[in-house]
Image (cartoon, grey):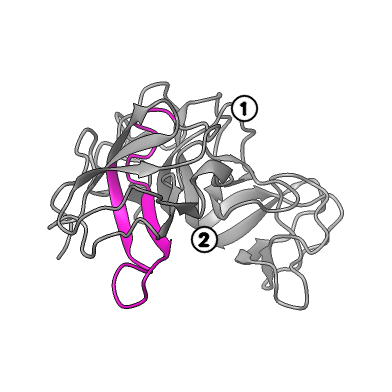
Amino acid sequence: MSYDNYNHEYRRNGLHESAQLYSASNLWTPTEDQKHMLGMEFSTNDGRTFRYCQNGGTALAKNILVQSEAEAAGLVDELQTAYGVSAGEKVFDVLVTTGNGISNGDLVDGYLLVNQGTAATDEGDLYIIKDNKWTTSDTVLQIEIADEGGVRNAIAATSNITILKNRYRDVIVKPTALTAEVVGATTSIVAADYYFWAQTKGPASVLVDASDTIVVGEPAGQPGTAGTAGAIGLVANDGTDPVYGTVMYAAAGADYALIDLNI
C-alpha cells in the first residue's frame, strides 16, 4: 500500500535549480498566496536544500531558526469513544477536545497516529491526512486520508489518536526552550501568515546565541543554555540537545555565523 489520494491543490514534486527559480520559486521573496505543498523540497546546484513553509501569526526576522507550531492539546491522545473507524475507510469522523484551534483545511498533509490501541491491530498505525473539516462544532472532526486502500486496520472506539499539522505549517521562531522540532532557517524577513522557503541543508547565515562562543569545525545547535530566540549555539555536553549543523565561520554572539546546516 502507498498513497493514491494526496491533496494535489498545489505542486508536490520537488524543484531543482534553476527550474522556476525566479518566478514561482524565488527563494528570498515570501508570498501572501501559497504556490506549493508545504514541505516541498527545493535543491540548488551547490548542495543547499530548502523546504516550503507557512509562517504563523507573527513576523519572522531573517537568518533565524524556526520550529513547527507546538502541538494542540485538544488533538493529542484523544480517546475515540463511540467513534471507531472501519478498515478501508478513507473519510471518517474522529472525536477531539474543544478549544483545539483547528480550522477546515488546517491539517492538509498532516498526520494521524493511533498512539494507543490494540497491539495486534491498530496501535501504532500512521496515516497522511488529505483534508479535514468540522462535522460538529469543534468536537467531531471529519478526516480524509491519502493512504491507498484507506485505513489499514480498524480503529477501535477504545483507541486513542493523536493528530498533528504538517510540520511546515504555521511555523514560529525557535523559542529558547523548544516546544517542537526545528524545521529550518529563514533567509529573509517573513510577514505573518506568508509562505516562504526555509533552508535546511548547506551553508547558511544563522544568528548566534548572544551568550555563546561557537568554534569552527565543531557542531552547533540548540544552545545548552539558550538566551536568544531563533539563535544557534553550543549544544549541551550530555547530548540531549539537537545539533543543526557544523560551524564554517564562527561569528561572535549576537552576530551571524556561516553554518553548514543539516536539519
Q: In the rendering, which numbered label is found on residue 263?
A: 2
Q: Residue at x 41, y 46 (%)?
A: 166
Asked whether residue 17 appears in the rendered view, the answer is no
Q: Give how far apart the Cα atoms at labels 2 and 1 are.
A: 23 Å
Q: Residue furthest front?
A: 82
Chief SS of the magenta region: loop
Image quarter for residue 126?
Answer: bottom left
Residue toward you, 214 or 196: 196
Give coordinates of residue 235: x percent, y percent.
74, 68
Give coordinates of residue 175: x percent, y percent.
71, 46
Residue toward you, 13 or 252: 13
Residue toward you, 89 or 241: 89
Residue toward you, 58 or 155: 155
Which residue is identified by label 1?
A: 58
Q: Image height check: is 163 above or below 108?
A: below
Q: Which residues are magenta?
A: 103-130
Give coordinates of residue 108: x percent, y percent.
33, 40
Q: Image height check: is 237 above or below 79?
A: below
Residue type, label 1: Thr
> How many labels were placed on the picture?
2
Q: Residue at x 46, y 32 (%)?
A: 102
Q: Is residue 109 magenta?
A: yes
